[in-house]
Image: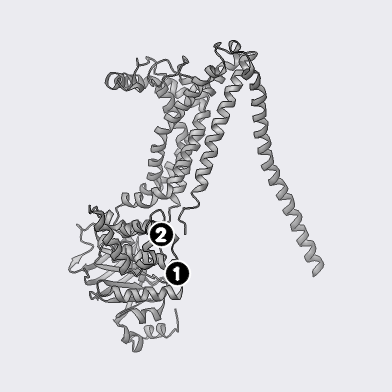
C-alpha cells in the first residue's frame, strides 16, 4: 500500500533538451502533494517521470534517482510496465475505455495483471473501487452500460476507480479537474481527501485554491527564463507556502502577480 | 455602405449557388451512370433470362450456367479475403504502432504502391512465378492434408489452381484493406492508449485494449471493400486460373470453377447472339453481388461513428 517517494537530483531530458533540472524532494506516504507552477514549467513532465509514462515520448530519458520505498524505479532491471501497474495515474481529461462497460473499465487493470479470480471476488473489487471513488450509488444499476455514457465528472471518478482497483502504491493525478465543472471538481477534491487515508497522492494543478484545499505539501515549479529548463523552486507545508513562502517567485505566483 | 455590402453578399450567394449546382450535378451524374449501367445490364440480360434452356451455352439453362461461375467468384474472393485481412491488420499495426517512424512511412508508400500495379502484371506474375512455385507446396498439402476436402487434389502440375488465384487476389486487395485499417488505427485517441499503459499494460495489451476495439468496425468495413474488389477482378484470375467449370472446393487441382468476370473476359470475343446475353446476365449477377457487398461495407463503416469514442 501507500509508499514514500524520494527523488534525488532528477534531470529529465527530451532527446538533448533538458526539460526539468535538478529536482530533489521527498513525499511522505498517505499525504497529498500538490505541484503548482506556470504552464510549461515541467510539473507534468516531472509527474509522468514518477511512473515512467514520459518514456512513451521517443528519446525521453532521465538522470538521477526516483526511489519508491527504497526501490529505484530507474534501476536497469526494473520493467516500466511493472512500475505503472503499481503507480496509478489519473489524466487531465477523463479517459474511460469507450468500448468497455463501466464494470470492465474498473476490472481492466486486474485482468491485465493476469490474476485469475472467481467472478464474485472480481465483483467485490469492482464494487469496493466504485464505492471508494464515490461512484457506486450512481452507476450500480448500469454497470454493464458503456462508461462513455456518464457525465464528465462521473467519468473522471470512474477513471479514479479504475486506477485504485489494482490497489496501487501511489496515485498520480495530472490536473484531474481541469475539464470539470465546479460541482464535479468539489466531488473529486472530497474524494482526494478520503483516498489520502490509503494512498500516497501527487497532484498537478493549475488551480491554486485547489492546491491549498487538498494538499498537505505544495511544491512550486518555475522556469528560470524562456527556453530554460523547469526546476523546483521550493516545496513545503501547504499552509507555509501559501502564507509565508521563502522565495520571491513563489510569492509572486501565488499572489497572482504572474502565471 | 449598405449598397456595396448587399452586392458583395449577393455575389457570395451567386458563387454558393454555382458551387451547389456543380456538386449536385456531380452527385446526380454518379446516379445517372449507375442507373445507365444497371439498365444496360437488365435490358441485355433479359433475352437470356427468357430464352429456352437449350439455347443457353451448356444447354441446361441460365441458372446452371451462372451458378458455378458465381460459386468460383465468391470462393476465390472470400479465400483472398481470409488471407489478406489478417495480414493487412498485422501490417497496419506494424506501421502504426511498432515500426520506427521512418520505416513506417516507407512501408506505407510501398503498400500503396501495390495498389498501383496493373492487374495484368499481377496476372503475369501469378502465371509465371507464383503458380510454378506453389506446385511443390500443393503436392505436400495433397500428401499430408489430403483428407481435408480443400486439398483433395490431385495437385495441378502447372500450379494454376484456385489457391494461386486466391493468393494473387489477396495481394491485390491487401493495399485497400491496409490503407483503411491504418487510418483507423492512427485515429485511436492517445488518451486511451495512455490510460491502458498507465494501468500497467504492455504494448500488445494496450493494442488489444484500445487500438483493436477502436478499429474493429474499420477492419470489417475495409475487408468488405476488399471483398468487393476481389469479386470483380478480371485479368489476373483469367490468366492464372485453369478452368474446367463445375463446382468444387478443391483448391489445388487443375479443374476449377471460373469466376464471372474472368469468364466474361475469356468468352466474350467468341460469343454471338444469346451467348452474349448470357454473359451479360452473369455480369448483372456480379453487379448485384458487388453492389450489395459495398453497400454493406459502407453501413458498417458509418456505424463506427456512433461508438468511435472520440469524446
First in residue order: circle 2 vs circle 1: 2
Query: Looking at the picture, does residue A135 appear above or below residue B54?
Result: below
Q: Is residue A77 left or right of residue A33?
A: left
Give the labeled residue for mark 1.
Answer: A179
Pointer 1 local density, CA inside 10 Å: few below 14, some 14–19, many at least 20: some
Closer-to-camera residue (B272/B9): B272
Closer-to-camera residue (B80/B122): B80
Residue at 25 percent across and 64 percent down: it is: A167
Q: Is residue A225 visible?
A: no
Closer-to-camera residue (B286/A170): B286
Q: In this view, does B200 lie to the left or right of A147?
A: left
Residue lying farthest to the left in this orientation: A70
Q: Position of residue B1 (x, y in %)?
A: 80, 70
Residue lying farthest to the bottom in this orientation: A244
Give the labeled residue for mark 2.
Answer: A147
Q: Position of residue B216 (x, y in %)?
A: 42, 46
Q: Where, by quadrant of the figure, is residue A218 drawn?
A: bottom left
Label 2, label 1: how many angstroms apart (C-alpha)? Answer: 17 Å
Give the number of marks: 2
Residue at 47 percent across and 59 percent down: it is: B311
Q: Position of residue B20 (x, y in %)?
A: 71, 50
Q: Which of marks 2 and 1 is in front?
A: 2
Amino acid at each position: 500500500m501507500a509508499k514514500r517517494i524520494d527523488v534525488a537530483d532528477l534531470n529529465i531530458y527530451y532527446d538533448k533538451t533538458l526539460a526539468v533540472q535538478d529536482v530533489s524532494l521527498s513525499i511522505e506516504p498517505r499525504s497529498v502533494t500538490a505541484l503548482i507552477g506556470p504552464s510549461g514549467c515541467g510539473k507534468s513532465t516531472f509527474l509522468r517521470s514518477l511512473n515512467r509514462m514520459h518514456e512513451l515520448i521517443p528519446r525521453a530519458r532521465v538522470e538521477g534517482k526516483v526511489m519508491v520505498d527504497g526501490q529505484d524505479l530507474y534501476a536497469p532491471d526494473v520493467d516500466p510496465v511493472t512500475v505503472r501497474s503499481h503507480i496509478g495515474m489519473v489524466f487531465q481529461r477523463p479517459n474511460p475505455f469507450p468500448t468497455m462497460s463501466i464494470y470492465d473499465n474498473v476490472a481492466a487493470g486486474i485482468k491485465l495483471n493476469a490474476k485469475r479470480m472467481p467472478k464474485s471476488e472480481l465483483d467485490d473489487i469492482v464494487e469496493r473501487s466504485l464505492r471508494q471513488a464515490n461512484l457506486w450509488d450512481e452507476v450500480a444499476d448500469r454497470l454493464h452500460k458503456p462508461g462513455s455514457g456518464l457525465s464528465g465528472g462521473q467519468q473522471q471518478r470512474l477513471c479514479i476507480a479504475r486506477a485504485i482497483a489494482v490497489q496501487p502504491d501511489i496515485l498520480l493525478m495530472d490536473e484531474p479537474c481541469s475539464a470539470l465543472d465546479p460541482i464535479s471538481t468539489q466531488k473529486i477534491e472530497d474524494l482526494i481527501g478520503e483516498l489520502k487515508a490509503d494512498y500516497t497522492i501527487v497532484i498537478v494543478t493549475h488551480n491554486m485554491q485547489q492546491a491549498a484545499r487538498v494538499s498537505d505539501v505544495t511544491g512550486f515549479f518555475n522556469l528560470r527564463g524562456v527556453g530554460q529548463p523547469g526546476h523546483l523552486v521550493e516545496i513545503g507545508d501547504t499552509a507555509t507556502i501559501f502564507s509565508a513562502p521563502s522565495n520571491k517567485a513563489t510569492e509572486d505566483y501565488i499572489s497572482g502577480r504572474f502565471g | 455602405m449598405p449598397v456595396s455590402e448587399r452586392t458583395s453578399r449577393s455575389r457570395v450567394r451567386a458563387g454558393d449557388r454555382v458551387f451547389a449546382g456543380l456538386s449536385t450535378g456531380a452527385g446526380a451524374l454518379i446516379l445517372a451512370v449507375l442507373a445507365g449501367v444497371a439498365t444496360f445490364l437488365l435490358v441485355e440480360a433479359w433475352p437470356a433470362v427468357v430464352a429456352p434452356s437449350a439455347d443457353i451455352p451448356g444447354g441446361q439453362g441460365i441458372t446452371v450456367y451462372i451458378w458455378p461461375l458465381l460459386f468460383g467468384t465468391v470462393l476465390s474472393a472470400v479465400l483472398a479475403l481470409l488471407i489478406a485481412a489478417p495480414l493487412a491488420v498485422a501490417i497496419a499495426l506494424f506501421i502504426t504502432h511498432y515500426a520506427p517512424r521512418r520505416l513506417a512511412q516507407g512501408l506505407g508508400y510501398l503498400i500503396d504502391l501495390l495498389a498501383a500495379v496493373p492487374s495484368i502484371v499481377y496476372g503475369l506474375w501469378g502465371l509465371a512465378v507464383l503458380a510454378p512455385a506453389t506446385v511443390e507446396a500443393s503436392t505436400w498439402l495433397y500428401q499430408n492434408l489430403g483428407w481435408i476436402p480443400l486439398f483433395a487434389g490431385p495437385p495441378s502440375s502447372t500450379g494454376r489452381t484456385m489457391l494461386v488465384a486466391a493468393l494473387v487476389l489477396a495481394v491485390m486487395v491487401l493495399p485497400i484493406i491496409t490503407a483503411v485499417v491504418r487510418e483507423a488505427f492512427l485515429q485511436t485517441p492517445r488518451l486511451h492508449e495512455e490510460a491502458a499503459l498507465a494501468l500497467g499494460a504492455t504494448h500488445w495489451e494496450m493494442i488489444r485494449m484500445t487500438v483493436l476495439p477502436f478499429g474493429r468496425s474499420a477492419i470489417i468495413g475495409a475487408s468488405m471493400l476488399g471483398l468487393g474488389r476481389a469479386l470483380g477482378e478480371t485479368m489476373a484470375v483469367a490468366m492464372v486460373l485453369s478452368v474446367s467449370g463445375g463446382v468444387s472446393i478443391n483448391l489445388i487441382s487443375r479443374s476449377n470453377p471460373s469466376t464471372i468476370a474472368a469468364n466474361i473476359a475469356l468468352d466474350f470475343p467468341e460469343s454471338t447472339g444469346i451467348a452474349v446475353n448470357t454473359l451479360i446476365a452473369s455480369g448483372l449477377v456480379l453487379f448485384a453481388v458487388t453492389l450489395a457487398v459495398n453497400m454493406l461495407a459502407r453501413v458498417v463503416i458509418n456505424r463506427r461513428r456512433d461508438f468511435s469514442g472520440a469524446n
